[in-house]
């Protein structure tokens, strides 16, 4: 990774333990964040707005110390499609260049209640679709960080924040996490509130978050669900059953990524993990097109006012999305939803004896250039099915850049999926 600052960035658990043991202070945590921002942000450009001074002021006004709150003193970034009470929201669009002021989105309110310090808004692509903002990949600033949670992935990867919120409608969490080499969780669809977010396609839109460790993802999950936090259990690799999709959606995967994936499977098999191929029925090969149809159809409804009132300020890709949605027949939309419903049942039956399904998170390393954000094809089906997914970092491509593994789990079993992700990351890191 290209580094602009020498010290290892703090994880959320580092901060939590350091504060509890009085090895860190709140000011020291923010000093470390400020130092990372000063050295990284001019190159990475992950933030729309950033103000650690406001976090310091908020801490000074605390009538009662944050104490043992799960996220006490932990900085967090917020993708700029979620409203916050202290930063305007722009949605990555010139239509909202003036900034929308509103109260905290539900996820932000829950994070604050758990003691998190909201330090800023991270760059999103236009309305969380394809047109990129200025953010660059911290590993190579000539390459995309992915999208649409571009700033959140890059900020976490660069150590400018230990946690960041993002969202996914196609591949907007898993893909940038893969390109930037960080963990990301896309939970089960509709398991976490998107109140306060700009909707695109409600049948697909999913809150998610990014971090530098699986345990940090679990920490934020516990805070959002008001659960007691316990570190993830150490999964037993020899008892793990992983289903692999050897031929499904493989056409866009680069040859080098295929080779890296095969090497990873061999490594996991040597570690005792049971690896078995999973063949899916032909009908499921239509899920990618079905996801596109649902996204376009619902986006045309979600953005009716922008289309009718500010069409000239929409990018060409976003205008095409809305045009496609307007042209999508209701019967086509309902058929896509019906295919998704049937496939959820079929996929659950196919994977009933597997602990998780494994595939790649993106077709390869982050593409060169900042005018596009890469292809979300490897995430579209799982987003349509509403299944929880985790990006597992640790693999490297031929240019030394991250390539992520995508773990697909069973509905509402995020903690189990994160424990498996933690194990796979550890095995991969030790094996490379």
Image (cartoon, rainbow, N blue to C red):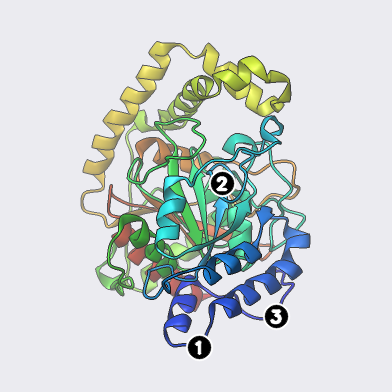
Query: Which residue is pictured at 67% across the width and 53% down the height?
Result: 49
Q: Quadrant of residue 346?
A: top left
- 419 displayed left or right of 161: left
Q: Nearer the viewer, mark 1 or mark 3?
A: 1
Give the mark nearer the N terminus: 1 vs 3: 3
Disc 2, disc 1: CB below 8 Å?
no
Q: Which mark is residue 69?
A: none
Q: Quadrant of the N terminus?
A: bottom right
The foreground one among 72 and 275 is: 72
**Residue 300 visible to the viewer:** yes
- 222 displayed left or right of 247: left
Question: Pointer 3: what residue?
Answer: 6
| Residue 176: x %, y % from top left | 58, 52
Q: Nearer the viewer, mark 3 or mark 2?
A: 3
Q: Nearer the viewer, mark 2 or mark 1?
A: 1
| Residue 338: x %, y % from top left | 31, 23
Disc 1, disc 3: CB below 8 Å?
no
Question: Pointer 2: what residue?
Answer: 253
| Residue 401: x %, y % from top left | 65, 62
Q: SS for tag 2?
A: loop
Circle count:
3
**What whole-number distance in Å separates the C-alpha atoms at marks 1 and 3?**
20 Å
Dot 1 crowding, Cα within 10 Å, few <14, some 14–19, many 20+: few
**What whole-number distance in Å separates the C-alpha atoms at marks 3 and 2?**
34 Å
Query: Is residue 314 placed above or below 218 in the rendered structure?
Result: above
The foreground one among 324 and 272 is: 324
Question: Pointer 1: what residue?
Answer: 23
Q: SS for tag 1?
A: loop
Give the mark nearer the N terminus: 3 vs 2: 3
The foreground one among 341 and 5 is: 5
Query: Which residue is pictured at 31% across the width and 75% down the height?
Result: 234
């Amino acid at each position: 990774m290209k580094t602009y600052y020498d010290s290892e960035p703090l994880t959320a658990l580092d901060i939590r333990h350091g504060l509890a043991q009085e090895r860190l202070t709140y000011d020291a945590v923010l000093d470390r964040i400020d130092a990372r921002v000063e050295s990284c942000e001019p190159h990475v450009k992950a933030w729309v707005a950033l103000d650690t001074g406001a976090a310091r002021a908020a801490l000074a006004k605390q009538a009662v110390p944050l104490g043992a709150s799960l996220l006490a003193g932990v900085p967090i970034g917020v993708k700029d499609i979620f409203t916050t009470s202290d930063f305007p929201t722009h949605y990555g669009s010139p239509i909202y260049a003036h900034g929308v002021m509103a109260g905290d989105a539900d996820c932000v309110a829950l994070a604050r209640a758990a003691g998190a310090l909201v330090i800023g808004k991270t760059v999103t692509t236009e309305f969380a679709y394809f047109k990129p903002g200025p953010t660059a990949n911290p590993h190579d600033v000539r390459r995309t960080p992915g999208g649409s949670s571009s700033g959140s992935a890059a900020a976490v990867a660069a150590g400018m924040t230990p946690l960041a919120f993002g969202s996914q409608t196609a591949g907007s969490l898993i893909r940038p996490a893969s390109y930037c080499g960080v963990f990301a969780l896309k939970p089960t669809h509709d398991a976490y509130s998107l109140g306060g977010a700009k909707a695109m396609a409600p049948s697909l839109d999913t809150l998610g978050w990014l971090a530098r460790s699986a345990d940090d993802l679990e920490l934020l999950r516990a805070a959002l669900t008001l659960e007691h936090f316990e570190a993830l259990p150490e999964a037993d690799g020899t008892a793990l059953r992983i289903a692999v999709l050897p031929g499904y959606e493989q056409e866009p995967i680069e040859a080098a990524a295929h080779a890296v994936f095969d090497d990873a499977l061999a490594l996991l098999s040597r570690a005792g993990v049971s690896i078995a191929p999973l063949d899916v029925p032909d009908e499921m090969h239509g899920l990618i097109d079905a996801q596109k149809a649902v996204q376009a159809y619902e986006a045309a409804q979600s953005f009716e006012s922008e289309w009718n009132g500010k069409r000239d300020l929409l990018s060409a890709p976003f205008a095409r999305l809305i045009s496609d949605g307007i042209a999508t027949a209701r019967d086509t939309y309902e058929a896509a939803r019906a295919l998704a419903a049937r496939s959820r049942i079929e996929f659950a039956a196919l994977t009933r004896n597997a602990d998780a399904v494994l595939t790649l998170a993106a077709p390869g390393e982050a593409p060169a250039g900042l005018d596009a954000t890469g292809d979300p094809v490897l995430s579209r089906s799982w987003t349509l099915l509403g299944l929880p997914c985790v990006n597992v970092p640790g693999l490297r491509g031929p240019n030394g850049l991250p390539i992520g593994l995508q773990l697909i789990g069973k509905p509402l079993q995020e903690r189990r999926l994160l424990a498996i992700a933690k194990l796979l990351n550890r095995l991969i890191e030790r094996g490379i």
